[in-house]
Image (spheres, rainbow, N blue to C red):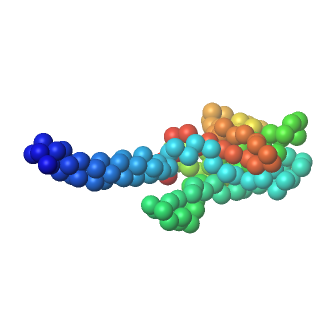
Amino acid sequence: MHSTTKKSIALIAIAVPMLAILFLCVAFLVGAKDTETQSWLYVAKTSELPGDGTPIMKTVSVTQFDAWTRLPDKPICQVFVRKSLSADAASVMYTWHHDGFKIPLRYDPITQRYVSICWNVTFDLQGKEVTGKGSIPSDLSVTQLPAKVIDDVVWVRLDGVRY
């Protein structure tokens, strides 16, 4: 064999394993799931929701993986979800108001409104503040979240939420 052929074989013998290692590293990094890429998250099945539009509280979770291992789901937040009466759609909103402070809400089925647990503030089913007699409007609202229904499943997008 000529020295050029020996050098070529040696170069190939070194280059192939190096390229394979490089390929595996790139595949691992590209395949690693960033939690923010999971744009639409499961909330509930529409068949679980009351038909009269009453909201229920559900936990939104994100699926987790560690290399090839499926880990338990990580709870992100809780939301109120309700079936829309007019069409096959759903409304999803956070279970708090005043985003910076995340003041909790509860749903009052008698008044059909969301009530702040800490402040004397109520919100309608669309998340707009309802001012009562003698109350001062505070321009608060509950954040409505982008939601869609596909094949009896309600999905929500949590824009700007880090998890």
Q: Is residue 65 visible?
A: yes
Q: Nearer the viewer, residue 5 or 83?
A: 5
Is 132 drawn above or below residue 105 in the view shown?
above
In the rendered view, does 87 fall on the left or right side of 104?
Answer: right
Spot occupied by residue 148 in the image (x, y as percentages of width and height):
72, 40
Spot occupied by residue 9 in the image (x, y as percentages of width and height):
20, 49
Q: Residue at x 74, y 53 (%)?
A: 44
Q: Is residue 129 visible?
A: no
Q: Nearer the viewer, residue 146 or 100?
A: 146
Spot occupied by residue 23 in the image (x, y as percentages of width and height):
35, 48
As drawn, the residue found furthest toward the front would be: 1
Q: Residue at x 42, y 46 (%)?
A: 30
The quadrant where residue 150 appears: top right
Spot occupied by residue 49 in the image (x, y as percentages of width and height):
82, 53
Q: Nearer the viewer, residue 162 or 64?
A: 64
In the rendered view, does 16 fall on the left or right side of 103?
Answer: left
As drawn, the residue found furthest toward the left would be: 3
Q: Nearer the viewer, residue 72 or 140?
A: 72
